[in-house]
Amino acid sequence: MNVAITWGAVSLAAADEALSNLSLEGERAAQVQGSLRAANIKVIDRRNSGTLLAFTNTRAPLSTAQLAKQFLFSHQLALAAATATADCTVVFSTGPVTYTIKNALLISSRGRLLGVTTIHDYVIKGGLLIVS
């Protein structure tokens, strides 16, 4: 897919790695106001925007199963030690555009081993998605 994704200083996907199950979901906080005799409800946009990014990354095979196991654990430790909220950047190799999810939090990460290959699932939730 030729996309690099970072969360703060931690690389979640390099441009040469196999990315799959990419999904992007936007959300807006709304307040619903009802009235006893009103025919319709009123929906108020509270201008709080959020973005949810989820994907699976298959990391390039390592030379031995032992190295793959070590990477699985060391990567999880790096994620746990990272800043609670950081900007998440997505850069496609086809152009100079950078997409950023402001104040993002890695809310879920799962790693698993398949021989000498590690597979990682990530879910990131943050604020507004911006383009630079």
Image: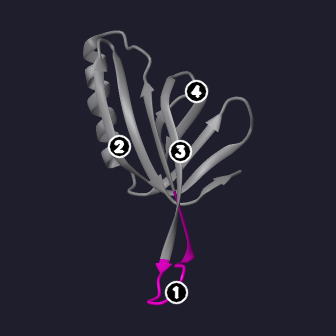
How crowded pointer 2 is (Cα within 10 Å; few <14, some 14-19, many 20+) is rated as some
Distance CA(mark 3)–CA(mark 4): 18 Å
Pointer 2 residue: 79
N-terminal of the pair, mark 2 or mark 4, is 4
Which residue is tagged 4? Answer: 15
Mark with earlier residue (2, 1)? 1
In the depicted structure, whether residue 37 falls above or below residue 110:
below
Q: CA distance from mark 1 to mark 3?
A: 36 Å
Residue under the point 36% across and 9% down = 63
Q: Nearer the viewer, mark 1 or mark 4?
A: 1
* Residue type indicated by callout 1: Ala
Which contiguous range is marked in magenta?
Answer: 32-50
Q: Amino acid at mark 4?
A: Ala
Q: Are marks 3 and 4 in contact (CB under 8 Å)?
A: no
Any mark on residue 38, and which?
1
In whole angstroms, how far apart are the C-alphas of marks 2 and 3?
21 Å
Q: Position of residue 111 (x, y in %)?
A: 31, 31
Q: Earlier in the sequence, mark 1 or mark 4?
A: 4
Foreground pick, 8 / 22: 22
Of pointers 1 and 3, the one earlier in the residue sequence: 3
- Label 1 to label 4: alpha-carbon separation: 54 Å
41 in the magenta segment? yes
Residue at image mark 3: 24
Question: Helix or strand or loop: what does disc 1 sit on?
Answer: loop
**Which is nearer the eye, 11 or 30?**
30
Q: Assess whether residue 91 is covered by the magenta stretch.
A: no
Q: Quadrant of residue 64?
A: top left
